[in-house]
Image (tube, grey):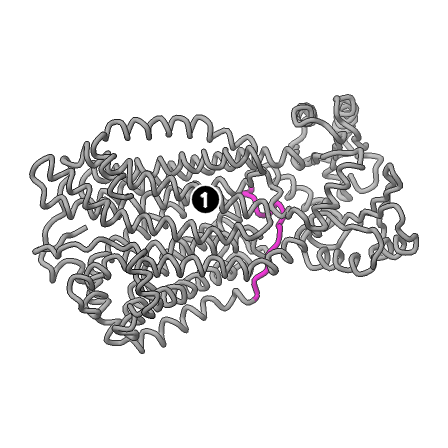
Amino acid sequence: MLSTLARAATRRPLTVIGLWAAFLLLAFGLGTGVFADLSDDVPDVPGTESDMADDYLSGVDPTGESVTAVVAGEPVSDAALRAQVERTVAEVRKIAGVAEVPDPYTTPGLTARDGQALVVPVTFEGGLSDEAEEEATDSAVETIQRIDAPDVHVSGGELLGRQLGERAQEDVKNAELISLPVVLALLLVVFGGLRAAALPLVIAVSGIAGAFLGLFAFSQVTDISVYAIQVTTMLGLGLAIDYALLMLVRFREERRHTESTEDLVEAVHRTVDAAGRTVLFSGLTVAVSLTGLLVFPSVFLRSMGLAVAAVVVVDMLAAVTLLPALLTTFGGRIRPSKARSQDEEGRVFARLARFAQRRRIAVLVTVVPALLLLALPVIGMRIAIGDARQLPSSTEARQLYDTVDAHFPKGTGVSPVIVVLKPGTDTATGDRIRALVPNSESRELPGGNTVVELQPPGSVDGKAATGLVERVRDVRGDEPVEVTGVAARLVDFRAMLADRAPWAALTVLAGIFVLLFAFTGSVLIPLRTIATTLLSLGAALGVVVWVFQDGHGAGLLGGEGLGALSLTAPPLIVSIAFGLAMDYELFILARMRESRQRTGDDHEAVVTGLRRSGRVVTCAALLLAVVFGAFMTGGFSPILQIGLGLTLAVLIDATVVRMLLVPATMALLGRHAWWAPRPLRRVHDRFGLREAAAAEPSVTTKV
């Protein structure tokens, strides 16, 4: 298949380039539309009690979404300000689609005790079309923002999703403006020429286009989270650079033996046949790592898994079709890599490999405990939905939160636990539920339904709120009572993770094992790879917990300790980082296998593998860290957590694990590392794919 793709790309390179150009125009033309349709409803899990109760409530409750405004910065008792606010409230009530706007001066709890702020909640009618609700929201916001006060902020409901979408678009734009020039500068250092350095960026643009188009396609059938934009874009950008870097390094090696155009085309074929197989398997391993997300019924996790897998496929196809076409057209102008003696090329990595082989026990007893120590905070990891503190201070929602927090009692504005008492519920059960918290509020709905709102102390997803959900579910017994609200969705999301996580892990590990066996023909190398990768992954996640949950140094990264991680961060860090680690493992294993097939020397194959791939792995990890770091400049806490986790996982894996643990464990296994039972060996001989063996060049090359 790879040979067919390579020959098609080199036979008609301009056609291939033209097709990709058309794809980019289509992808950017359609794909950027996803920014207008993003959701912040991450914890919804179809089929759970909270989700079904919410659906039921939306069908019987005549009220719809709401937004909240806060006015602050001067005494709210000022006669001129009061006249403005009362006039604004009257105007908003007249807007089509608005159901209720209470007077903040006469409604208890809407005016701050210090007299410096007031809250104006606006509730819309239920059953509005998306267009009508958007029009009503825009009119209400425009009217409220005409109030002449130092601080006027409006957010919540559908408006919050729109504000987050605009922020996500701005963050992606800024990250690209930061990362692409830095990446180009680093590639210039690596390749020493502008033409070679520019080609990975072309593939990277394809990855970004694939990210946008994939998300847009999925947005037509399901909700797309605001988190998906940054995650898929930074992964698409990073993987594209990784794959292009690997291909270009191999091409420059092959380029040293070309003189004519025919030789150049053959060099492209050899590049795709060799490095292209590694790219193919790398893409497959990343995609398989993301299949674990499909095991979860969460719409968010499933859509993220599918969208990122689509991006990986686009990156992979661009590397084995667009890049060969570009190399055929412009490759003659790319300088071959410099020739150096075999002893000089990659000597630092060769020395590390030999050191780790000689001192394998010392390396293992030093590195493994150190990584386990870094991973210790994972034991106490907590996940939460979070509040506006996750957002940058410049966002409207965060400014509203900070203003309310500064002037109103703690817990003001916290979403209540919502209990739906359906027809037939025993009166005594309803009374016991109301008695769980003081000052509970009830309202009757059509059809004999009663909604009870229980205001929990503390945060929306703290222990008090989630404990209240569990107490209601204990008290109701077999009565037709359902619980929903933010805290209930978090309880159900955590239960879903606990229930499906083992199956997700089993799916991913089995898939990775099969792919690595197909690549190596060994059953021990996949087991060793999985074990060492889990160590680096645990260490990275442990640092994220220590920083963003416990608050050690979070301020240095533009965040703060929140007492818990965003519920989006752990599953995404684990699935994506696991796939990226497989990338670097395959880069090294490919070279090891080449050397072993050629020489039959297991010991030297490990040294050669690191000697010839160490620079590529290190450069790829550094470039990926630059990309992730650029996306962390937005200040959005979930993205900070994901970015830090992926950056650390990549750097730890590409250095400590691949440069020390891999040679140490391979030396410990010795010739048994490549062992497989005879039946499996026959299966591999018949069906396994492998890196094409290449003749050892008389002189080696420098990346």
* Residue 60 vs residue 418, the one in the foreground: 60
Does residue 436 lie above or below 182 as drawn? below
Query: Would residue 590 be found to the left or right of residue 179 on screen?
Result: left
Residue extending farthest to the right is 427
Element carrying mark 1 = helix
- Residue lying at 50% horizontally and 34% vertically, measured from the top left: 217
Give how far across and how far down residue 156 sits, in percent. Answer: 66, 37
Q: Is residue 408 visible?
A: no
Question: Viewed as shown, does residue 533 lie left or right of 427?
Answer: left
Residue bearing mark 1: 308
Count of numbered marks:
1
Q: Which residues are magenta?
A: 380-393
**Viewer-nearest residue: 14 or 656:** 14
Estimate the x, y position of residue 509 in percent, counting from the top left: 45, 60
Mark 1 burial class by Cα count in 10 Å: few <14, some 14-19, many 20+:
many
x then y, percent, for residue 480: 83, 51
Can residue 289 be seen here? The reply is yes
Q: Position of residue 67 (x, y in %)?
A: 70, 34
Reply yes or no: does residue 608 show up in magenta.
no
